[in-house]
């Protein structure tokens, strides 16, 4: 199998062509650039300039501005001139969708234009169309005729271009031939790239965005492979997860999608799409990028893998034996770590999804309730709910009056040296960089009680753990694997990014039967770095539990709550996205497994909702269109009652349950 990156065991940037965007150089080993997109009305020159300046001062190296029509495209000149007058030379990018004439105007003004191949020439009406090969070639010729003028303008003016495919806005033509697939996303972009290459125009960046990190990652990998096979070169790649949402969920979903690719050296520029003001996207981008700035030679070598035992282009979960509620077809489990707690009371378990009522002597169990609790050297002196199994150190387990109520935990070779073990379930911590890790796992191949808790002491932790799990697969070792990661960063955002990348990247490739997150306990010295939000105490059980379930949700491994697909807002947005998203979330957060899209405008909304169950889309000033899947259910709903109408729609289709507070 041809590799989609330089190495699976050594960090190495993928070599791409060099692209010039104004005075900014992108690709060919240059630093990974960070960018964002304005949310102001493009015709409001002053507001757009002021917001752009806030983003630039936050660290944005590219500013994207929507230009949905001729008027907005022409006004880009006023915005650019005012920014230059104030001394800001940051390149501007025009965001184009359905209007080629707007793109042709913008390409003469700004340093880069972004076009969406799904709707630049084609239309999307969610219709299936059967083409003969001859008819399909005619459609490609139509693309060539409509797209070539823009290519020639960009070439003449030295303007860069991003060919940006979105999973949710694939054209009916692509959908009819390739389906709603990553390969369809790739072919959508390649059709336009071939036209540009025929015109000897190469100042091009590409992107493969999706709100589903799994689809996104597979599409980028396929794109790299396709460009290499067809052209022998790769164009620079812009990475992003569309409609990631807000808060911790938006950061986690973005970190998983973008971070998975950055781990393999793929990506030349990134944008984190949050339903927040655009300047707040930049610190998250910078936190992501800095993880890959110091990956210098001199670190221990991870042994190269001879054969990849899985396909990186399609999802298939690693085969593992079922053991209790682990492995096999069970959803991945979550382990809550209370080893550093001074003591454990029923009240402490509220943080990990369990609430005890003394009056009824009963436990209420939340959807995001941990499956195991690691107590370290301690034991619990009250009756736990049956869905929560405690795990303690082996030395503590040996002294228990009833060992059947706990599972023992061993550190590496402790297991082979132990004279007494559980006949049912044994947790073994394995450092993937340990010299005896593989030999130990091989020796335990037929032990049906073993769960491997896999971590790494290597600086490049994900690459190391992935290498170890690939060896397990190659050797047909089917012990369940719990991905174990330690948060060592100072800020909340950094911890979210680090933990999400190290575990989420593995879940996307089907590697992992559980997740166990820890972080260093103790109060942080806040004077070390300024300008950040700090955790008062890093061993925060609720934070780690929420992060674990969010990672599993974002990777589609375990759905524990409502999922929101929310666009990051732009100049086309027809209502207050942040306020509306918060309102919809407050009414629907208890609808486990339901996917609700909240889209700012009709331009991209219906397409980019992708696999949402229900959609809330701006369709005019103060007007909302409601969808079930891709079908319009209610048009022109007044925004003052639209949330209530959405709830009615959920009820009509049996997706509503009444919320019962714990």
Image (cartoon, grey):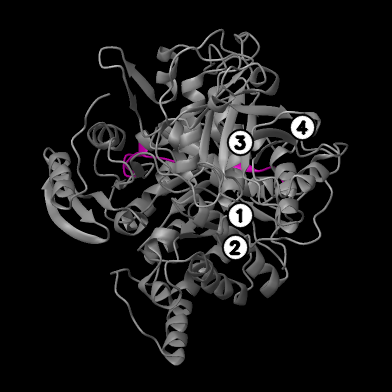
Q: Residue furthest front?
A: 401
Does 228 sit left or right of 496 as displayed?
A: right
State the SS at label 3.
loop
Quadrant of the rendered structure where residue 419 is?
top right
Alpha-carbon distance for marks 2 and 3? 34 Å
| Contact between labelled residues 4 and 2, with CB atoms less than 8 Å apart | no
Q: Disc 2 marks which residue?
A: 313
Classify 10 Å Cα crowding around label 4: few (below 14), some (14-19), many (20 and above).
many
Residue 318 — which label? 1
Lower sequence index among marks 1 and 2 = 2
Does 384 sit left or right of 266 as displayed?
A: left
Residues shaded magenta: 30-45
Does 197 sit left or right of 115 as displayed?
A: right
Residue at (45, 11) in percent of width and height: 345
Alpha-carbon distance for marks 2 and 4? 33 Å
Residue at (82, 38) in percent of width and height: 296
> How far across and down, in percent of the image, does residue 504 sit?
57, 43
């Amino acid at each position: 199998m041809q590799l989609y990156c330089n190495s699976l065991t050594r960090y190495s940037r993928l070599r791409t062509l060099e692209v010039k965007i104004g005075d900014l150089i992108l690709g060919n080993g240059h630093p990974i650039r960070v960018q964002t997109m304005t949310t102001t009305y493009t015709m409001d020159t002053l507001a757009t300039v002021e917001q752009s300046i806030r983003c630039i001062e936050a660290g944005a190296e590219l500013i994207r501005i929507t230009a949905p029509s001729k008027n907005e495209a022409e006004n880009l000149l006023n915005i650019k001139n005012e920014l230059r007058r104030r001394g800001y030379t940051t390149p501007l990018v025009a965001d184009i969708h359905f209007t080629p004439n707007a793109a042709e105007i913008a390409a003469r003004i700004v340093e880069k234009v972004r076009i969406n191949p799904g709707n630049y020439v084609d239309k999307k009406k969610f219709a299936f169309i059967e083409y003969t090969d001859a008819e399909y070639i005619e459609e490609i010729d139509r693309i060539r005729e409509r797209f070539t003028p823009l290519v020639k303008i960009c070439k003449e003016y030295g303007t860069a271009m991003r060919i940006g495919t979105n999973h949710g806005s694939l054209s009916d033509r692509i959908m009819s031939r390739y389906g709603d697939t990553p390969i369809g996303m790739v072919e959508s972009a390649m059709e336009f790239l071939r036209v540009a290459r025929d015109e000897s125009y190469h100042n091009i960046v590409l992107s493969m965005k999706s709100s589903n990190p799994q689809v996104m990652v597979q599409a980028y990998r396929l794109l790299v492979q396709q460009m290499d096979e067809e052209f022998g070169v790769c164009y620079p790649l812009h990475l992003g997860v569309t409609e990631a949402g807000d808060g911790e969920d938006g950061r986690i979903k973005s970190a998983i999608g973008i971070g998975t690719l950055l781990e393999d050296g793929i990506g030349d520029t990134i944008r984190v799409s949050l339903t927040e003001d655009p300047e707040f996207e930049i610190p998250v981008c910078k936190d992501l990028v800095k993880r890959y700035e110091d990956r210098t030679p001199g670190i221990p070598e991870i042994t190269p893998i001879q054969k990849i035992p899985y396909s990186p282009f399609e999802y298939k979960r690693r085969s593992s034996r079922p053991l209790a509620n682990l492995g096999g077809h069970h959803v991945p489990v979550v382990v809550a770590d209370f080893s550093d707690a001074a003591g454990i009371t029923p009240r402490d378990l509220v943080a990990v999804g369990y609430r005890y009522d003394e009056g009824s002597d009963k436990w209420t169990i939340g959807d995001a309730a941990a499956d195991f609790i690691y107590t370290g050297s301690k034991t619990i002196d009250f009756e736990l709910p049956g869905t929560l199994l405690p795990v303690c150190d082996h030395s503590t387990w040996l002294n228990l009056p009833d060992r059947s109520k706990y599972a023992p935990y061993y550190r590496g070779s402790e297991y082979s040296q132990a004279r007494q073990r559980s006949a049912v379930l044994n947790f073994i911590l394995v450092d993937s960089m340990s010299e005896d890790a593989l030999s130990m796992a091989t020796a335990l191949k037929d032990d049906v009680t073993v769960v491997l808790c896999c971590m790494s002491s290597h600086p490049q932790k994900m690459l190391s753990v992935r290498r170890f799990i690939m060896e397990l697969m190659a050797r047909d070792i089917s012990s369940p694997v719990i991905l174990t990661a330690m948060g060592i960063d100072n800020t909340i955002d950094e911890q979210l990014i680090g933990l999400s990348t190290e575990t989420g990247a593995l879940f996307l490739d089907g590697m992992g039967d559980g997740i166990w997150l820890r972080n260093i306990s103790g109060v942080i010295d806040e004077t070390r770095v300024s300008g950040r939000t700090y955790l008062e105490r890093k061993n925060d059980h609720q934070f780690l539990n929420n992060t674990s379930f969010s990672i599993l949700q974002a990777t589609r491994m375990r759905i524990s709550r409502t999922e929101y697909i929310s666009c990051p807002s732009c100049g086309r947005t027809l209502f207050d996205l942040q306020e509306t998203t918060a309102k919809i979330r407050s009414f629907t957060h208890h609808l486990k497994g339901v996917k609700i899209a909240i889209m700012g405008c009709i331009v991209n909304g219906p397409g980019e909702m992708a696999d949402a169950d229900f959609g809330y889309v701006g369709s005019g000033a103060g007007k909302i269109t409601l969808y079930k899947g891709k079908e319009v259910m209610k048009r022109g709903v007044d925004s003052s009652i639209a949330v209530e109408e959405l709830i009615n729609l959920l009820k009509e289709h049996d997706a509503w349950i009444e919320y019962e507070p714990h």
